[in-house]
Amino acid sequence: MIRLQRHFNIGAVVVGLVMVLASSGELQSQGALSTQGFGYPPGGLSTRALGTAGATGEFDLLSARNPAAVAELGNSIISIQGEPEFRTMRFGDVRENTRVQRVPLIAAGLRVKRVGILISGTTLLDRSFSTESPGSASIDGTSVPTLDRLDSRGAMTELRLAAGWRWKSFGLGAAVVAVTGEHSVARTRVFPDTLRFGGVLDSTRLGFGGIGAAFGMNWRASPDLLVGASLKVGGGLNALRNDSTLRSASVPSRLGAGVLYRGFAGTILAVNVERVQWSAMNGLGTEAATAQDATNWSAGTEFEFGTLRRFPVLWRLGYGQRDLPFLLRDLPVSERAIHGGVGVPVAGESASLDLSVQRSLRRVQGDQVREDAWALSAAITIRP
Amino acid sequence: MPERSLLSRLLPSSRSGAAPRFPNSPRAGMLAALMGAMLVVTACTEEFQGGAGCPLLCPQAQAPFVDTIINAIDLDTTLGPYPLLGLTNGVLLASRGDTLETHVVVRFDNLPTTFNPNNQSAQAPITTVDSAMLQFFVDTTGSKAEGEFTVEVFNVDTTDADSSSVVLRTLFRPDRKLGEVVIPAGALADSLRVPVADAFIEQQIALAGRVRLGVRIVNPANVQLRLGAFANGQAEPQLRFDPSTDTSYRPLDVVPRTAFVGSEADDALRLAYTVYGLTIRGSEPVPPGTVSVGAWPSRRAYFRFAIPRAIVESSTVVRAELLLTQRPSFSVDRGDSISVQPFIGVSTSAVSDLYLATALSANGLLAGVDAARFVPQDSGQRTFNIVNLVRGWSALNANVTRFVALRIDDEGTLGAEIRFHDLTAPAAQRPRLRITYLPRTEFAIP
């Protein structure tokens, strides 16, 4: 009876946490530092890895990082992840709030003999935003006010087919990567004097097509120490309209490494570092979408605290720092974030619910513009 | 990190692989609560609205508009006369000194020969006519009268070519005069009654003949009357008389009708000669270098556009104005404000007759082209906002002629004329198109 009560208490905490974060749409949000260029990179991390700021990303089979982690796959797995983000942009006296909703990861996998196979779709770059701002047009030598609006919806998506297997104390993996997706962009300009002037409404779509490959390795250096490394090699990346190629660049390559230690009872510690060659995308956009290479690192922990139906509830904490890929008028944009999360077994080990919350501070040099965000990630993972 | 929880493997219960057993209902409740939480998280509405940080944070600068004046009119001309004879609701009876003089002809080719005495069903022949009168509905909004004036009625029936204005003009002479009325200054009302000689009507009825009456205003006068004219309409003229000297009888009203050889199967032709105007002194011809709107007989200005396809089809037009340079006109009503109504082409190039194409045109209001008011004696640049029309042209079939025609309101009952410089004028005065557009540029690529 006491155990049952305890279970409900934990459930209530989880539900309460979710409700509070979900209702924070009424709180502040949104800026545009993260929507420069081709958009914001969610990172390809599962909710579980997000709880540690991505520190366990090299060892997490659902995260689109190290294909060697797929070697740990059981019989089969299905996972879907939702990720609302509430952003507040401050620029001088200006304060602006927005909300975005992402489904940054869908994955399904199964084990075939000794090989784990996982197919997943993750958001590489999310470019959903709307801007509405006053503008002007020079007509008859005089400045006529306009209201300019730009709406962009869409994302670049990374489809990944990964295979991993174990060999002695190693986990090995390889993946083929396809980049696809579409941006739907609409441009509107309206004049206050609608009788004299007609408005502008142009809309278009931009598709993407690219390829890449990834390789990874995990090494169990000791019973409690895991070391992992992965490399993604980017191939061509094209911006397409119908069957025409508008611009070409390359899928950004990535080199990452991580260490995971589980020598403490009920606790793991992990660190991760990666280098993403975002500059390979230069040329896909205009000069206004200049990308810089990013060095990202994170450290985090996952520990047991409490149980739910005799299964441990896992709590996660992490801190990460990374560079966002696209410059704001030649100025780099960085992101620091504190992460926390919880993993709850829903039906024993057959299904679990992972939640994470992330507080991100995005800054540009000189702090002229500040963007703070709350992001909530929730994932259901089922192991049929 | 193993797919199954790393930490769970450290627990005895998990290592055993045995699924714990729990009562079903709390487990289901917990699962439902967590699934609900998941739904709440994923069902958050989106709010993308930003832009307060623009232009600093807006990733793309807006492309500039192109604002220019182009010679986009490849043909202009003056078309007329309008409207077609007899096919108007009104007809103008005018005596405007040396600028405009018109007469009106009304035909009563079918006269009654019997009537119903005492409203009985039995018919009796009409042997006597009393109080014969030609009466018109007067549209006072389009009528003017300065001082006293006289309206005269003549017998204009002839065996000669009675559709010839030359012949008809000679019939307005004293020996054919049938009556007159003097309208004192300020006494013009919404109806006009001109007495007609009873004996003449009586004689025509007795002969089973016809009555064709010509009406004029006697000079010197500065009067114009807009009279109801359209046959079969409520405002048509009527010949009214008493079929008896007994004034207790209700008068008979005879409506205009005509019939002549060649009109048997042509209603429009019959209507044209039932009630119509006769121009005695009209407007002067269109001077060189001019396109004309209005005048008497009325004219229409025609402007055909040839806008570069790159603008119409590959840009977004936000402003388009037809620029016209008005030049003074010395027409009647030259100081009045005259409404000019644009019409737009809807026929294909298969209709090569410009007069016909203009007759088939649609009211400019359908494309958001509003009427404008002009004073004939003024001069200077005038504009018609045609932005919605030009924007619509991109969706039109290529063989639809892109033109704008201008006509005055009350065409056919107003003698005012508006003049514009035509394409032969100096560049700054010729008809042109002022256009502002946004060239289609790539904006999806950041």
Image (cartoon, coloured by chain):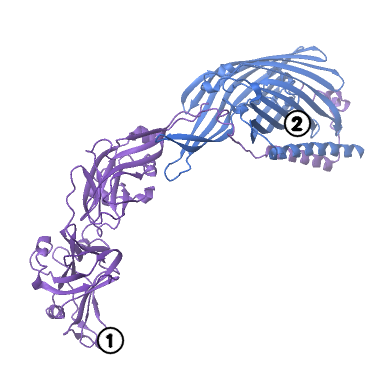
Chain colours: A blue, B purple
How crowded pointer 2 is (Cα within 10 Å; few <14, some 14-19, many 20+) is rated as many
Name the quarter where the N terminus of chain A is drawn: top right
Instruction: Specify whether disc 2 shares its chain with disc 1.
Output: no
As drawn, A287 above or below B386 = above
Q: Residue at x 30, y 40 (%)?
A: B399
Seen in the image, is B335 located left or right of residue B38?
left
* Front residue of this view, candidates A160 and B315: B315
Q: CA distance from mark 2 to mark 1?
A: 100 Å
Seen in the image, is B337 located left or right of residue A252?
left
For badge 1, the amino acid type reads Asn
**In the rendering, which numbered label is found on residue B82?**
none
Residue B141 lies, in percent from the top left, at 31, 63
Name the quarter where the C terminus of chain A is drawn: top right
Task: Give residue B75's quadrant in the image.
Answer: top left
Q: Residue at x 25, y 58 (%)?
A: B414
* Front residue of this view, candidates B307 and B153: B153
Name the subunit of mark 1: B
Tag 1 residue: B119
Q: Residue at x 13, y 65 (%)?
A: B261
Residue A153 lies, in percent from the top left, at 57, 33
**In the rendering, which numbered label is found on residue A354?**
2
For badge 2, the amino acid type reads Asp
Residue B356 lies, in percent from the top left, at 24, 50
How crowded pointer 1 is (Cα within 10 Å; few <14, some 14-19, many 20+) is rated as few
Residue B255 lies, in percent from the top left, at 23, 72
Seen in the image, is B389 located left or right of residue B210?
right
Give the secondary structure at mark 2. strand
